[in-house]
Each structure stands twice: as structure tokens, then as C-alpha cells.
Amino acid sequence: MEEYFEYDVGLSFAGEQRQYVEDVAEGLKGRGIRAFYDKDKRTELWGKNLYDYLSDVFQNSCKYCVIFVSKEYADKVWPNLELKSAQARALKDDYEYILPARFDDTPISGLLDTVDYMDLSQMTPQQLCDEIANKLGKQLRERYMPPVLDRLHERLDISGDAQLQGVAEHHARSFFDILLRMTIEERGAVLSMIRFGCPADLPRNVHMNADLLSRYTGIPKMSLLRVLGQISPLGFDCTFVRGDDHETDLPGDRLGDTHSFYLNWVNLSIGPDHEFALPALVVAAEMIAGATENFCEEHGTSFLERLDFSQLATVTASVESHEPNL
């Protein structure tokens, strides 16, 4: 599996060029490209140690880093911190991690004159977006959450409610982050329960026959007790209910059992008022349904195994095809 990056591209710039860069950030978002743009992270950045946070982003969290070179960039402290972090990453990678884009010909320490660059005096923000998209190329998406989740909003019927959209986005990205941290067994059990379990008791829980869950996951029933019992620190509440023996008119002993798992998830990173307005488990259920909608079970499972939620955005959604790849 390819190395995971939270962002496809990081945007490092001086404030004087913010309008141009903001247009680039919006253009990338409209193409389904995950860009680190500081203004989009205003709430997340609030109260953080920016030195540590930005150093980590530009050294570890992006697949590429676009440096918007200008006189102001060369003179400012924070852009230089971002550049040094990007350069530290470039030293250990065997591909062109730093992508210079110049507003002027100001020399930048550590950035060789021989490195090819984009001339922004001859390029609109949308043209630069095209070049970044070409650099990223087409690839099978893995561990991917779109920057805009408009199809998830439609599924939740909140397209006209900005506040609930914010809650849904927070739940969705929290659930995605939790899936990334899970073991393969934990992830398989949770995704299978939410995908194939009975939703009749939503938003309180989803439930599923224990033997059926074992068949879907390939995990023995007794092992499922262990797997589902160790995810409570992530906000999950799982209960194993032993079914009663029901009388039957048929002779002999009744075969099989009705033991079931009941699963709930509460987003621990959000306040109870928001959880009440839009329960986290409902969002998780619609994420999984939306990620696999209109696909056969095999293809839908492939999306979830890759943690590819591209179907939740119009710009990244695809149509199922059984034609061989040429």
C-alpha cells in the first residue's frame, strides 16, 4: 500500500499573495484534491503550537508541497519555517517533493536556480490547479476522504443547513481518522456491522447476528468478542446479547442460536448538543452506504477495504464498470 498522506499538496505562501493562493485552494478542492491551506484550518489551528504543527504538516503530512516564491516569502518567518520543514522532507525522498511557483525571481535559500518552476506571472490560479492535478496524476485512491462531502449532505438531507453540514463533516472526518487507527480486524468488524447490520434501532445502535457477522468478516465468533471489546476507547459501545431459546412446534432440539452484537458510536470529540442534533452513528452509517451505493458487494467491499470514500463527493464519484482495464 502506498504511503498515506493526509494532504495531496501543501500550500506555503506569504500573506501578501493570499488571494491568489486562496483561489488555488478553492480550485483544488473543486477537483477533489486535498490541499493544506491554513485558512481552512482556522479552528483546528486555534491554540496550537504553530511551530510544531506547521513543521509536521510540511515535513510529514503532504505528498507534494507548492512553494509560492515572492520577495515577501523570503522575508517572513513562518514561510521560511515551512520551507525548511519541506526541505528536510525533500532530503529523504527520491522524488520532487518541493514544487516552486514564482511570483518573481527572488532567490530563496536552499532552492536552486536550476530547479524548474511555474511562472505565476503567466498563469492563472485555475491553470496552476490543472498543473498540480497533472502532477498528482490518476491513481487508485486509498485512505481517501474528499475535501467536500456534498453527496453525504444530500444523503443526510442537510444540504440547506450549514450548521448541520459542519457537524456532519466533523463526524465524518472523525470516523475516518478512527478507521485509520484501527487494526484490520477491528475495521472489518465495525464496517461490516454498520454496512450489513439491522438499522432499525438507529440512532441508538445497529445490531447483527453474531454468526452472520462471523461469516462476513471471517473472524470466529469468540474472537469477535475480543475484537469488538477493545474499541471502546474510540467511542464505541458494543454489547453481546445471548438469545433465548424459543419454543418450537418442530420435534427435537432447535439448531443454531440468536446471539447478536449491538454497536453504537459516539463522537468523543464533539459536544453533546451537536451529537443530539445529528448522531455520529447516523453519519457513519450514511458514509458507508454512500461509499458503496450502486456498486455490487464485491466492488463496494473493495472501496471500504481501501478506505476510499470518494463516492461521497460529486467531483470524485465514479460509476461502476465491470469492463476490464485496458
Image (cartoon, helix red, strand yellow):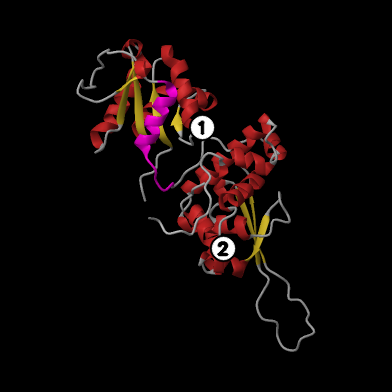
Q: Residue at x 25, y 14 (%)?
A: 107
Q: Magenta segment, principal secondary structure?
A: helix
- Which residue is labeled 1 in the image? 30
- Nearest to the observer: residue 324 or residue 194: 324
**Residue 43 drawn at (x, y percent):** 55, 25
Q: Residues within 10 Å of mark 2 (few under 14, many from 20)?
A: some
Tell me the quadrant of the picture where the C terminus can be found: bottom left
* Stretch of the chain drawn in magenta: 124-141
Give me the disc on residue 225. Answer: 2
Q: Amino acid at mark 2?
A: Leu
The span from disc 2 to disc 1 (Cα, nearest Å) is: 43 Å
| 2 vs 1, front mark | 1
State whether residue 237 is above or below residue 112: below
**Residue 198 drawn at (x, y percent):** 68, 59
- Nearest to the observer: residue 5 or residue 251: 5
State whether residue 106 is above or below residue 89: above
* Magenta span includes 139: yes
**Residue 316 drawn at (x, y percent):** 51, 42
